[in-house]
Structure formats: structure tokens, C-alpha cells
Amino acid sequence: MKAAIFLILFFVSLFTFGQATISGVVKDEKGEAIPGANVSVEGTYDGASTELDGHFRFVTAETGEQVLSITFVGYKSFTQTIQLNGQDIELQVVLKEAINQLDAVVISAGSFTAGEEKRRTILKAVDIATTAGATADIAGALNTLPGTQKVGESGRLFVRGGDGSETRTFIDGMMVLNAYGAAAPNTPSRGRFMPFMFKGTSFSTGGYSAEYGQALSSALVLDSKDKADINQTDIGLLSVGGDVAHTQVWDRSSVSGKVQYTNIRPYFGLINQEVDWIKPPVSLEGSGAFRQQVGDHGIVKLYGNFNRSDFSLYQHDILNPVQVKAFEYKNNYGYGNASFLQSIGNRWTARGGFSYNYNEDDVVLDGGPMGQIEKGTHTKFVFENSVSDQVELRFGAEHINISYEASRLDSLSIQQVLKFNNPITAAFMEAEAYASKQFVARAGIRSEYIGLEEKISIDPRVSVAYKPFEQGQFSLAYGRFRQTPQNQYLRVNNKLAEEVAEHYILNYQVINNNRTFRTEVYYKKYLKLVKFVNGNPGQLTNSGTGYARGFEL
């Protein structure tokens, strides 16, 4: 009997000697207790949950080097290596709040975003197609947003007092020249690209990223759709034309194409027009796209678009409408875009591409021919790194080359040719950091070398946002932006400097129950604007200045 009791006591003491008690308390960064946190030894069933006061306590028979893990929803996981040798362990643990992109503050000063990847939606493709008065045109729909001024005789995006040329369009990060179709004088033009091509739309009225340059007032960033999902053929017949489109899908790739013909003559024959047409607008347009998935997280996109249009009309003199001049216009346009996106490891992403622009205008005004050709190429590479859950770094470089040639006959029927070539090389770097779910800051810098000027510029851009409430937030942005003068000025004086604009923006936004309330105060200061010398259009300088200021609701 004594031997049995001795054996029992021996094994109980042996088992007790091998056990260790792990206890402690779990709090957040404010010192408040976190109840319900899961505490465990990794790879075992030993553990406990924290009490209402944040304390925990459990016993484990594990020995040697082990990993203690503490997790709780909304906070970063905590791990610590511990040595278990039978001695008790007591810990004081502070969990750091995790930055959840769905709940965290976002920088909204000067920007409107929409797309599948954004939690906040302002305009989707179907919204653009159904917005009253937009006629399924991207610029037409965006002209209904605060910060834009609708100019009926142009149809382009005029942002906060700026000219339509101050808004630059980018497709998959690549610059688009001549983003609007041909139009008669004093009649609105339409964008060349259909909204259903794109999965995301980002429109900025100022203070945009350092990645985008050569835009004084605004950047319209369009992200094209990825690989198509189904095979599809569409045939459209209208009273003013028709189109046919087809999409073919494979396991990891897809190809699509479309051809469209438009002739407005039948419509003009039914409804009397104020414009004195000789030949109503006729256009032939085609586009094609190819998508190829690369690896698990990469994709290559190819896109091409061509358009040929022409029309003619009589222009009536303003003072004497009886006097008319025949105006004939033909336009040939081509755009090609190749881009890629590839993840490198867990934290790096590389993207970039190449685009080619071609635009040719042939005009005959009262028997006098004139024309212009603009060609542009854009090469770009961008690298993004998630340094941590709270810090993202983006940097890259690009090269833009724009060549322009204009010709006309002078009074002696001698052809005059004006041309220039403008290479632009740029580099940028930008960092975005979350101090908490309530505060985020983005700082960037962009440097450009302008070939015509032979000059280097450096422009800072800074944005911050603070979210004091669950649904409301404040944003503040500053940036300096520049753009080469329009071709009509550079062909007269190709030594003109870049025009400059400085943006100051304060924004407050609330999004709740599918409703958006937004108010913004802005000030835009213009420097080095192109200006006529004593009203003479043949003498140009960069002595012009200006400003735009106001508030939007």
C-alpha cells in the first residue's frame, strides 16, 4: 500500500514539475484592456482567451523553445519566442491596431474614384452611360461633377477655370494625346473611348499623384478591363450606322475587336440643323484588345484604336451672315497601348508600358489647304513596394517624345512648314504612410527634363487626410504642376517655358448609406502662362499669370 501511494505521488510531482503557467495582460496602444483575445502556444492546444480586464492565464506541459501567439480581430498578430523549463512566465502585451483598407481613411482632396477595386464608388461605367445629357461620353458624365465647367461649344473637361487642354487622359498609366474626336468649329466633341472598356475611373480636379505629369489642372486615369469571361458577338444596326464586335476567350487570354461606321446624314435629313452642312460627319472606327495572364498575379494588355472621319460645312461671317466660307476637315487618328502588371514576391509590384499616338488633321478653308500632324510616344516603368502594412512606396521613370509639324500655303502659294520635337524625361517618387486608421499622409516629388527648354524642374506634391468620425474625413493637398504650352503656341515660339500651376485644396467628405456629401475649398495659382506681346499673336512670352479660387458643394 505504501509503495502504491509513493508511486502515485512520484508521478504527480513529476508531471507538475514539467508544467509552466503562462499569464499576463493584453492591452491596446491607449492602455485599454482587450477582452476576448486568443492566446496560445503555436502548434499545440494549450491556450486561453483574455478576460474582460485583458488578463489571461493557462498551464502548458510543453518544454523548450516555443512560440506564443496572441490574435484579435482588428489588431496585428503578436508573436514572441519563449523558453519553457517549468518556470512561470508573465507577460505585458500591447497589440497594435491593424490598418484595414476598407475602414481606414483615404485621401480624397480633389479626386473622384470609381471601380471594382475601390470601396467608394462615384461613377461606374453604367452611370456614365445613363447620366442625363452625357450621351454615354466619359467627359460628358464627368462634366456633371463639382469642379468642372460645362463648355457647350467644346465638350471637353474644363476644370476650375482651366482650359480643356489642361486635363490629361491616361489609359493604364499611359498618356493619351488628342483624346477627343474631330468636331466642327463651335460644336462639342466626344471622347474617343467608350466607358465600358474600363473597370475603373479616377478623375482628379487637382492635387493628384506625382506619377502623372504634363497636366496643369486635372488627370483622368482610366484602367482597362482584364481578361474577358465569355465568348460574345454583338451586331448593332442604327439609322445612322452600324457596328460589329466579337470577343474570344481562352483559359488565360482573350481577344476582342470592333468595327463601327457612322453617317449622320439620315438624322440631319429628318431634323433641321442650325449648322450649314455641306457633308455631314462620316466616320469609320476600329479597335482591338488582347489580354494575357502571366503567372498567378501578372497580366499583359494590348490595345489599339483607329478612326477616320471627315465633314464639310459653310462658315457664316458673324457680322455679315450672307458671306460664307467653305470649311472641309479630315482627321486620321491612331492610338496603340501595351502595358503589363506583375507581382514580384509578396511586397513588390512592377508595371509599365508603351503607347503610340498619331493624329493628322487636313483642313481646307475657303480653298486654302493647311494641315498638322502630331506624333507621340510614351514609355514608362513603375515599381511599388509595400514596405509594411502601413507604408507604401512608389517610384518610376518615363520618357515622352512629341513631334509636331504644321503646313500651310501663304499668300504667294508657297508652302510654309513649322515643326518641332519635344522630348520629356521624368522621374518620380512617392510614399504613403498610415499613422493610424484615422490619419494618412502621402508625399511625393516629380522631376522633369524638357528638351525644348533644356531645363530640369522639381515639383513637390503633398496630401494628408484625417478621419475623426466613422463616415466623415478631412483632406488637405498641395502640389505644383506644369505642362508644355499648346502646339499652336510652340509652333510660333518653341523656346517657350512650361506653364505652371500651384494647387491648394481643403476637402471634407461624408459617405453613408450610399449617399455622398462633399465640400471642397480650393485655390489655384497660375504662373508662366503664354501671353501675347502687345496683343500680337506672333510674339509670345511666358509673362502671364492668373488664379482660380472658390468652393464646391
Image (cartoon, rainbow, N blue to C red):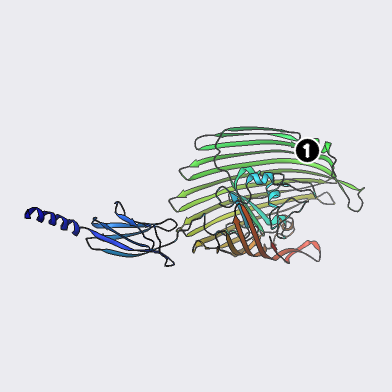
**On screen, residue 480 above or below 129:** below
Residue furthest toward the front? 1
**Viewer-nearest residue: 8 or 66:** 8
Q: Report x, y in % for residue 238.
A: 73, 34
The residue under label 1 is 264
- Residue at 24 percent across and 60 percent down: it is 20
Q: Report x, y in % for residue 545.
A: 72, 67
Q: Is residue 178 visible?
A: no
Quarter of the image for the C terminus: give it: bottom right
Q: How many marks?
A: 1
**Viewer-nearest residue: 83 or 311:** 83
Image-based side of 29 in relation to 116, left or right: left
**Viewer-nearest residue: 225 or 281:** 225
Image-based side of 281 in relation to 259, left or right: right
Where disc 1 sits, the SS reads loop
Q: Report x, y in % for residue 57.
A: 30, 60
**On screen, residue 6 above or below 547:** above
Mark 1 Cα-neighbour bin, 10 Å: few <14, some 14–19, many ≥20 = some
**On screen, residue 304 above or below 533:** above
